[in-house]
Amino acid sequence: MSKVWIVLLVIVGLIALVIFSGIGTYNGLVGKQQGVDASWSNVLNQYQRRADLIPNLVKTVEGSANFEKATLENVINARASVGRVTIDASKAPDDAATLQKIQEAQGQLTTALSRLMVVSENYPDLKASAGFRDLQAQLEGTENRIAVERGRFNDVAKDYNTSVRTFPAVLLAGMLGFHPKPYFQSEAGAEKAPDVNFNFGGTPAPAN
């Protein structure tokens, strides 16, 4: 076999190796991207589950005499604000700004619901309601699921982002439309336990 043929075979072999390596890289990134999108969908499912509980919660709370109107309105308005944020449930956002808007709207709803639960402590008839206790338990469970799914999303996104930014995928990712995904961030002050005071309008509780 002449040297020319040997050189040609080597070149063809190298081209085939590059092609197959590129195909493998592309398929791997597709799989990881699908994992991120699936995890994103799970987060949104839990957000939706919480939103679906709110109408029944509002109806139950409204049945309690003289319940703080402003607190209830904050929950209703926060839920409405969440609905005004455009979300693509089939694809995790590529930019941090979009995720930040979603997180801020959901954070306002979380705060409003937390306030409602604190205020409910001042209404014995509401606390004694089996329907309210059931909704409260469901909301608490949903909040835990939201936290879990957000953590899983960050883990899956980290794995995907690492693949996108490492060699040889980094040479192809941008051209093929694979971009790093933003992470959910901890809420400001989340590392600090909230200071809850149940003495509404009364004398402050003595310090421990």
Image: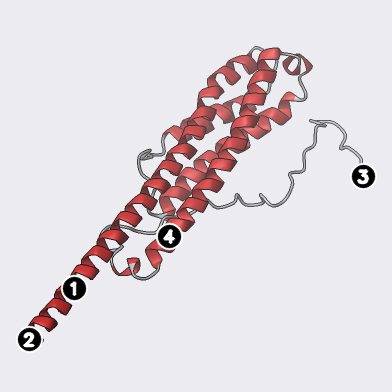
Quarter holding the C terminus is: top right
Identify the residue position indicated by label 4 in the image.
161
* Percent x, y of residue 93: 39, 49
Identify the residue position indicated by label 1 in the image.
13
How many marks the image carries: the answer is 4
Secondary structure of the residue carrying tag 2 is loop
Q: State the residue in front, 185 or 58.
A: 185
Say if residue 74 shows up in the picture: yes
* Percent x, y of residue 34: 37, 46
Local packing at callout 3 (Cα closer than 10 Å; few below 14, some 14-19, many 20+) is: few
Residue 143, picture quadrant: top right
The disc labelled 2 sits on which kind of residue? Ser
In this picture, residue 132 sits left or right of residue 157 = right
The alpha-carbon separation of the residues under discs 2 and 3 comes to 92 Å
Local packing at callout 2 (Cα closer than 10 Å; few below 14, some 14-19, many 20+) is: few
User: Which numbered disc, 3 or 4, marks the residue that appears first in the sequence?
Assistant: 4
The disc labelled 4 sits on which kind of residue? Asn
